[in-house]
Image (tube, rainbow, N blue to C red):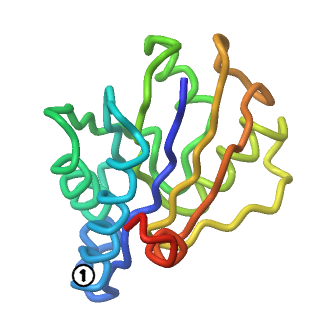
Amino acid sequence: MILYFIRHGEAGHIAPSDFERTLTVRGEGAVQGVGRALCGVIHRVHCIFASPLVRAQQTAAILQGYFDPVPIETCNHLTPEAAPSNLLAELGHCTNDSNILLVSHEPFISTCISYLTYGTADARISIRPASVACVHVGAVIAQGAGRLDWLMTAEQLARMNLA
């Protein structure tokens, strides 16, 4: 299984609550670039899981437009302070050959990548808005069972003419 952790695009700061913050125009553009890059790298996406926060839902909807019809599932295990173990349990029903986009936030993404690849939350990983991390996991989705294949920002994807 290949997990693509995607941090939502840049979000504005003015909203009634953190839950309701929306993408900025710049954030939308960066996510569109990420979508173009990913559709050139990933031939099929089986599912998009997204945090329930508005900016993550917007990011997921933009990405969805770059792939054949693929469902977006709202997942409460992708919120900023969620426990990685809950997400791993959620993904347990997916097949080993799945390509899954996970649209989430910091500090969850860096914590989850560390948990999957290092076995603890101690690895020092930083995920900027509209960045993508590719983590390969084997037949068993478990703590320490993953491998970080790559991590790129939207700017890096654009410089490589991938976005």
- Quarter of the figure with the N terminus: top right
Q: Position of residue 4 (x, y in %)?
A: 50, 43
Question: For the point 43% across and 45% down, which residue is it?
Answer: 41
Q: Viewed as shown, does residue 66 lie left or right of 98?
A: left
Three-letter code for the amino acid on which mark 1 is drawn:
Ala
Q: Nearer the viewer, residue 98 or 108?
A: 98
Q: Which residue is mark 1?
A: 15
Q: Position of residue 117 (x, y in %)?
A: 77, 38
Question: For the point 24% across and 69% down, which residue is it?
Answer: 20
Q: Nearer the viewer, residue 7 or 122?
A: 7
Q: Residue furthest bottom?
A: 14
Of helix, strand and loop, which one carries label 1?
loop
Question: For the point 75% across and 46% down, which residue is it?
Answer: 114
The image shows a total of numbered marks equal to 1
Up-down relation of residue 116 to residue 159 (above or below): above
Q: Viewed as shown, does residue 35 lie left or right of 140?
A: left
Question: For the point 65% across and 26% down, which residue is it?
Answer: 137
